[in-house]
Amino acid sequence: MFKKILIASDGSEGAFKALVAALRLAHSHKAQLHMICVEETQWIPGSREEVIGDKELADRKFAEVVAKAEVEAKHHRVKLTSHIVVGHPVPAIVDFIAREGFDLLVTGFMGHSALYNRVIGSTTDRLVELAPCTVLVVK
Amino acid sequence: MESVWLISALWIGLALVSALISIRVGISVALIEIIVGSFGGNLLGLTPNDWISYLASLGAVLLTFLAGTELDPVVVRKHLGSTLSIGAVGFIAPYLGVLAYAHYALGWPWPQAQIAGIALSTTSVAVVYAVMVETGLNQTEIGKIILAGCFVNDVGTVLALGIVFANYNVWLVLFGVATALAMWFTPKVMPWFTKSFGGRVSEPEAKLLLLILFGLATLAAIAKSEAVLPAYLLGMTLATFFIKERALAQRLRAITFTLLTPFYFLKAGSLVKFDTIMAAIGLITIFLAVKMATKFVGILPLTRVFNFGCREGMYTTLMMCTGLTFGTISALFGLTNHIIDQEQYTILVTAVIASAVVPTLIAQRWFQPAFKPIAKEDAHVQENSDR
């Protein structure tokens, strides 16, 4: 049923669970599997150094995430293509799905406090609302 | 002595709270420090004393110096005309527009209107840079030209701040000559000095830089100019040196951002009066509108000249409407030198903060360009042996 699957990873434990689920789905559906990691930029940075520092931190973090995902993909015998983009997670992922024509987005449940989710909303909520394809949220 | 430590603990505690909030919500620590400082000033009675003001001033000078070191001199040399045109228009249009509005429409005297014009003439290099990184424009020649133009824009701001209110006497001439000599000699001396004495725990190279900055700041103060002017200009001339000496730049940044700039931004926030914001919200909105309108008039046509698409042109122009650090520095200069009063300071700083927030929101809501992958797409591929 699914031919092109995207797993969105923020490097969290929830995202890793989603990766495992996505790998199983990709294997059973014989689907292409891509992973997107978004290096989040600070909103209204006060200095260029803040931007550079955040980016270096994110580069290190996502290099580890990709390496761990590769090992897991090898274990599941699935081809995984990773993409790292810079920006704000929701628009970056939504734009990427629309541009590359994915038919399933798999994402972990990004856990915030109940109050935070109620007041601000979570990234997962926004992805479910805005993604132009089927969304699977793994808890 | 106890109260010194108590005050230190209070201010650094607020700085810590700001840093944690900043990390949690993903908004600049500088902006959060201003907001936290404003709550401290209005609700906790947070008042900057002499030594806090000194640390804040030192923070502003080093922050400006470090901002200058981030210039890409190769791009400026290669595209001098386009860089200067974008930067000059980015400064002059809002400077004149806001100055005229404050003087002719509001009846502010010339010096106060000058501060308004200068404070709202800035472009936030950091915000524009962040956008460039997001869109991949920072890797393109046009992106680099725009970014260099932002530096030129801010040169206009610090030049105006350093010259408009100065005493035109022999001290100003001496200050100008000393700054020019420092800009000429320091890039030649620093590599040799660092090679000969650098890399030690006592940091002689950092001390030499501070000595030069403090010396120029002394002359600036005597000439009734502003210490951030030579700091920014000196930083720009040392940009090439700091590309090679990244470790020194990182150590200076660590000192500045840990211990000095929090005092600066918290102080800037603590002097904002909430009741003035409520009373003058309309005026603040108009100041913001004038800044944005004049930036549009100046910069949007230039994006067409440089073959930006409609969406990208609007996005870039909106980003160049932003301002934060240099805007607050200008407003605080006016307040410290009794050119503007605290009500006017509040109006200008709030307009500056609004200019950091509103154009960014509009740009990201309606004019967000497409995101491009930045990593090698096939760098992390595991082949399925079944396929």
Image: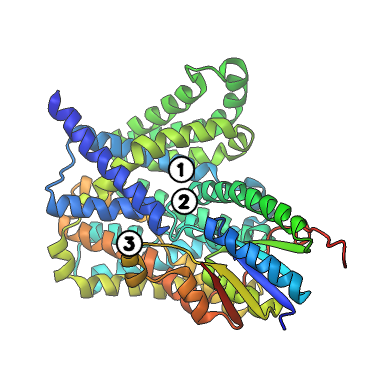
In front of the other: label 3 or label 2? 3
Q: What residue is pinned by disc 3?
A: B353
For residue B232, the mark is 1
Provide residue B3's location: percent of width, then percent of height: 13, 29
Q: Are marks 2 and 1 in contact (CB under 8 Å)?
A: yes
State the image quarter where residue B237 is shown: top right
> Closer to the N terminus: mark 2 or mark 1?
2
Q: Quadrant of residue B277?
A: bottom left
Residue B338 place in picture, x, y as percent:
18, 48
Mark 2 neighbour class, 10 Å CA radius: few under 14, some 14 to 19, many 20 or more:
many
Q: Nearer the viewer, residue B316 or A55?
A: A55
Instruction: Tell which tag, 3 or 1, sits nearer the viewer.
Output: 3
Tell me the chain of label 2: B
**Element assignment for label 3:** helix
Residue B135 x/y as whole percent: 61, 66
Please say if B281 is above or below B113. Answer: below
- Between disc 3 and disc 1, whose residue precedes? 1
Choose between B305 and B136: the one closer to the eye: B136
- Residue occupied by mark 2: B155
Q: Amino acid at mark 3?
A: Ile
Query: Which residue is at a point 42% across and 58% down the rendered structure image?
Result: B26
Dots 3 and 1 on the same chain: yes
Residue A79 in the image: above or below residue B310: above
Residue A118 in the image: above or below residue B273: below
Q: In the image shown, does B67 or B248 lie closer to the viewer?
A: B248
Q: Label 3 lies in what chain?
A: B
Q: Is residue B315 above or below residue B377?
A: below
Discs 2, 1: same chain: yes
